Image (tube, coloured by chain):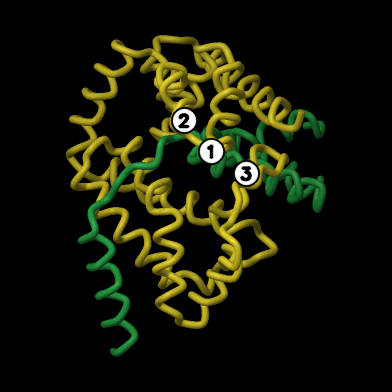
Chain colours: A green, B yellow
Amino acid sequence: MNFEQFQNQSRLYVIGALEAEELEEFEEARKKFGKKAEDFISKCYALHEAFALSLRPAKSSDAIKERLMAMVKAKKQS
Amino acid sequence: MAQSRVGTRTIAPPLEPGAPSDFELMKGIQAGDADALSQLYDRYNGILKALILRVIHNEAEADDLLQEIFMEIWNQAKNFSEQKGKPLGWMVTLARRRAIDGLRKKQAYARAEERLQNETEQQPDAWVHNATEEEIVLGDTRVLIRKVISSLPPAQQQAIDLAFFRGMSQREIAAKTNTPLGTVKTRLELGLKKYMTASRT
């Protein structure tokens, strides 16, 4: 696998779209390309953030936050 | 809202003067500061809820999951590392994984599938469908991201949508869209590549 092919696979990898049989070859290439590979994969993870930011924020009830903070408080006290 | 990135390009929705950065809030959470979690919740609950809703299509379940995810953020904050990326990216990855896991585990999967089917038939591309309305009410970041997404051919958008928001494998997408597996792979590869390239220009 050359680096361009690895880049294509990396984009699929970060969104979980690599098929099982592609993963082994991907991991081998990941080791082969080392830091260059890790740096590119990190860049690809920005896709997650961007796709989430493409959505219109949804409202949640105030009760959710109240319950959350009560749970956090209880956990801190335990 | 904190800084955001599209691909490798940084977009910076302004933080209010004096407001702590996301990294500072994460450090606070790591130190056990509940107020830092409260602020992070206020900043991002809307985005994470929208992401969860997009996956599971159920308001009540999305609220429950949102609460669980922020509890997980509190519990797992020690595993967050600045070197690995930004807090929002970490939270989105966590939320997406939990939402997709939840979807697959619950019987709601079948119901959501049916709803998605209906939505797909009614509006083959939700990203494109909402673009005009969104441009009126959303900030620059969202508009820019949508602009890049809507520049992709609809088939590529659909493939990315099913993979990212539904957690579908290439085979599942091929079966759902009645498209050859190789075509699905090409659509995903081209779409994601174009997206990342466009967002850098």
Q: Is residue A20 among what the camera can see?
A: no
Q: Judging from the image, what secondary structure is the residue with disc 3 in?
A: helix
Q: Judging from the image, what secondary structure is the residue with disc 2 in?
A: helix
Indicate which disc, 3 or 1, sits on the residue closer to the N terminus: 1
- Residue plotted at (56% across, 66% down): B19
The quadrant where residue A69 appears: bottom left
Residue A15: numbered disc: 1
Residue position marked by numbered label 2 in the rendering? B163
> Number of numbered discs present?
3
Q: Nearer the viewer, residue B82 or A12?
A: B82
Closer to the camera: disc 3 or disc 1?
3
Q: Judging from the image, what secondary structure is the residue with disc 1 in?
A: loop
- Pinpoint residue B186: horizontal percent, then vertical percent: 61, 17
Q: Amino acid at mark 1?
A: Ile
- Residue plotted at (60% across, 63% down): B17
Q: Nearer the viewer, residue B64 or A24?
A: B64
Question: Alpha-carbon neighbours of circle 1 within 10 Å: few (<14), some, or many (≥20)?
Answer: many
Residue A46: numbered disc: 3
